[in-house]
C-alpha cells in the first residue's frame, strides 16, 4: 500500500485540498476602515440622531398627554354621571359659585373617584398647582390670574402627579374644571399640559364637555392655534386623539385633520 502524505507531500489529496480552499477569497488586511472613514460614519449617525430623536421624544410626549387627558375625561365623566344619578341634576345642588358649593363639588365629583395625594383647598400652601400658567401663544397669565385661582378655586394634587382645580359659575360655565397632567412641572401651558372641562347648559340639561367643541364658547377652530389662548384644544385631544395643532395652524374641526408632511 502506498504511503499517502496527508499533510502535504505532493499527492493528489494535497492538490485537491489546495484547489478547494482557493475558491474562497483571502482576507486582505488592507481593506479595513480608515480612521477618517470611521469618523465620517459616526458624524453621519450623530446628525441623523440629532434630527430624529427630538421628534421621537416629542411624539412620545404627545402620545402620553393624549392618553392621560382621555383617561381623566373618562373618569370625571363617569363621576359626573354617577353623582347626577345619586344626587339629582347638578343645578339642584348647592349653588357651586359659593365656596361651600365648590366644596360640595369636591366631595361629590372628585374625592369618591380619584386618589388624592394633596388637598390644598382654596389656598395653595402645599403647592398643588403652578404659580403661573401660560397661554398657548406663550403669553404668561401672570400672578393676578394665579391669585384668582388661589382665592376662588379648590385645588387638589392627584396620586398620578396631575393637578385639578375647579369652581362653580366660572364665566359662562356652570362648573369649570382644569387639569394639568404633570402638576407644577413645566410647561404649564394651555393645550400642552393644561386642559379645561366645563359643565354647561346645552338647552336640554347640564352636560360635562371638554373645552373646544364646535358651537361652544371657545371652539377649536378659533381658539387652538399658535396665536390663541389655547382654551379650545381639549376636545381635539380627546376626539381626534392627537396634538397636531402644535405643528400647524390650518387644522379645522370638520376639515383638515393633520399637518402636511
Image (tube, rainbow, N blue to C red):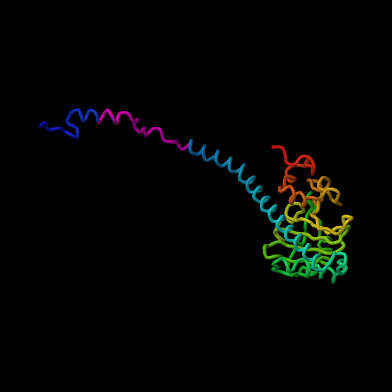
Q: Which residue, as the protein is rendered here, is positioned at the far front?
A: 85
Is the C terminus in the top left, top right, bottom left or bottom right quadrant?
top right
Reply yes or no: does residue 21 show up in magenta: yes
Please, is residue 251 above or below residue 17 in the view? Answer: below
Reply yes or no: does residue 30 show up in magenta: yes
The picture places residue 169, in percent across and down from the top left corner, at 87, 62
Answer left or right for 166 relative to 64. right
Please, is residue 171 above or below residue 38 in the view? Answer: below
Give the residue at x 80% y 68%: 86
Q: Which residue, as the protein is rendered here, is positioned at the far bottom?
A: 100
Answer left or right for 161 relative to 40. right
Q: Is residue 211 visible?
A: yes
The picture quadrant where one finds residue 92 is bottom right
Q: How many marks?
A: 0
In front of the other: 84 or 64: 84
The picture places residue 224, in percent across and down from the top left corner, at 79, 48
Answer left or right for 232 relative to 68. right
Is the N terminus in the top left, top right, bottom left or bottom right quadrant?
top left
The picture places residue 131, in percent across and down from the top left corner, at 77, 62
The picture quadrant where one finds residue 4 is top left
The magenta region covers: 17-36
Give the residue at x 80% y 53%: 211
Q: Is residue 147 visible?
A: no
Amino acid at each position: 500500500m502506498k504511503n499517502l502524505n496527508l499533510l502535504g507531500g505532493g499527492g493528489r489529496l494535497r492538490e485537491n485540498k489546495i484547489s478547494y480552499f482557493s475558491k474562497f477569497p483571502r482576507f486582505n488586511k488592507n481593506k479595513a476602515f480608515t480612521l477618517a472613514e470611521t469618523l465620517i460614519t459616526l458624524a453621519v449617525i450623530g446628525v441623523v440622531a440629532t434630527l430624529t430623536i427630538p421628534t421621537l421624544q416629542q411624539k412620545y410626549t404627545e402620545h402620553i398627554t393624549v392618553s392621560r387627558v382621555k383617561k381623566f375625561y373618562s373618569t370625571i365623566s363617569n363621576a359626573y354621571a354617577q353623582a347626577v344619578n345619586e344626587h339629582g341634576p347638578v343645578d339642584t345642588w348647592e349653588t357651586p359659585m359659593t365656596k361651600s358649593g365648590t366644596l360640595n363639588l369636591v366631595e361629590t365629583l372628585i374625592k369618591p373617584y380619584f386618589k388624592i395625594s394633596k388637598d390644598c383647598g382654596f389656598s395653595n400652601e402645599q403647592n398643588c398647582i403652578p404659580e403661573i400658567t401660560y397661554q398657548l401663544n406663550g403669553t404668561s397669565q401672570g400672578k393676578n390670574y394665579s391669585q384668582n385661582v388661589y382665592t376662588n378655586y379648590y385645588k387638589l394634587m392627584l396620586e398620578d402627579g396631575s393637578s385639578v382645580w375647579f369652581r362653580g359659575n366660572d364665566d359662562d360655565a356652570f362648573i369649570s374644571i382644569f387639569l394639568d397632567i404633570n402638576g407644577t412641572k413645566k410647561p404649564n401651558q394651555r393645550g400642552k399640559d393644561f386642559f379645561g372641562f366645563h359643565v354647561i347648559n346645552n338647552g336640554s340639561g347640564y352636560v360635562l364637555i371638554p373645552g373646544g367643541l364646535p358651537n361652544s364658547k371657545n371652539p377649536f377652530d378659533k381658539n387652538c392655534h399658535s396665536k390663541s389662548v389655547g382654551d379650545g384644544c381639549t376636545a381635539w385631544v380627546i376626539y381626534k386623539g392627537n396634538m397636531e395643532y402644535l405643528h400647524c395652524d390650518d387644522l379645522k374641526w370638520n376639515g383638515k385633520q393633520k399637518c402636511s408632511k
